[in-house]
């Protein structure tokens, strides 16, 4: 009987450490991002142009975002360069502010995006990150 009790305890889900940190200023991050939406995006409409991206394939979106990553790197990969390209191309409404998403804490962004931001050192650009919104480049500011 004790064996069955301990095995049932193993199936009880635990709260991830990031969820316990919600509200903690130590866990807050900041970033800019450049989003390229495509047919698989949860809302395939560009906030920059108002046009549908339902006809953009995943392959086309990856090719385009890779080209932007190369341009940003070729021009020094600074926050200023990143912001300029995010303003020119991002499909997120934050394009108006150079992709600036401000400061956010655990659980405030889509999990894939938050993980991509957390894995990117401050002052650098991420590799391509896929979220439910589309493909992102992230420039970590905090």
Image (spheres, rainbow, N blue to C red):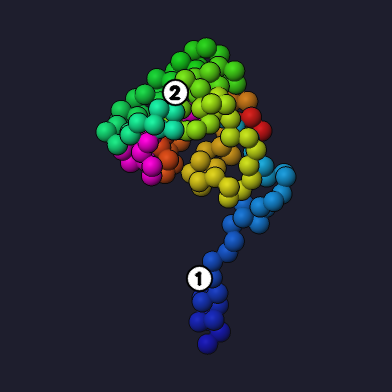
Of residue 88 and residue 121, the one placed in the foreground of this image is 88
Front label number (1 vs 2): 2
Q: Residue 15 location, x and y as percent?
A: 59, 61
Q: Residue 102 location, x and y as percent?
A: 63, 35
**Residue under the point 71% across and 49% down:** 24
What secondary structure is found at the residue carrying circle 1?
Answer: loop
Sequence order check, earlier mark of 1 and 2: 1
Q: Name the residue beneath numbered marker 2.
A: 89
The residue segment tinted magenta is: 33-45
**Residue under the point 36% across and 38% down:** 44
Q: Is residue 82 visible?
A: no
Q: Residues within 10 Å of mark 1 (few under 14, many from 20)?
A: few
- Give left or right: position of 138 versus 106: left
The answer to which image quadrant residue 68 occupies is: top left
**Res. 11 mark:** 1
The answer to which image quadrant residue 76 occupies is: top right
The answer to which image quadrant residue 141 occupies is: top right
Answer above or below: position of 7 versus 78.
below
């Amino acid at each position: 009987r004790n064996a069955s009790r301990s095995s049932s305890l193993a199936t009880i889900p635990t709260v991830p450490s990031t969820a316990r940190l919600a509200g903690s200023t130590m866990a807050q991050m900041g970033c800019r991002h450049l989003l390229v939406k495509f047919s698989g995006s949860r809302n395939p409409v560009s906030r920059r142009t108002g046009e549908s991206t339902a006809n953009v394939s995943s392959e086309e979106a990856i090719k385009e975002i890779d080209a932007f990553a190369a341009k940003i790197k070729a021009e020094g990969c600074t926050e200023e360069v990143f912001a300029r390209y995010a303003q020119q191309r991002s499909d997120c409404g934050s394009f108006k502010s150079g992709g600036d998403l401000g400061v956010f804490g655990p659980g405030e962004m889509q999990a894939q995006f938050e993980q991509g931001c957390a894995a990117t050192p401050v002052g650098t650009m991420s590799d391509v990150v896929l979220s439910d919104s589309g493909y992102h480049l992230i420039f970590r500011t905090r």
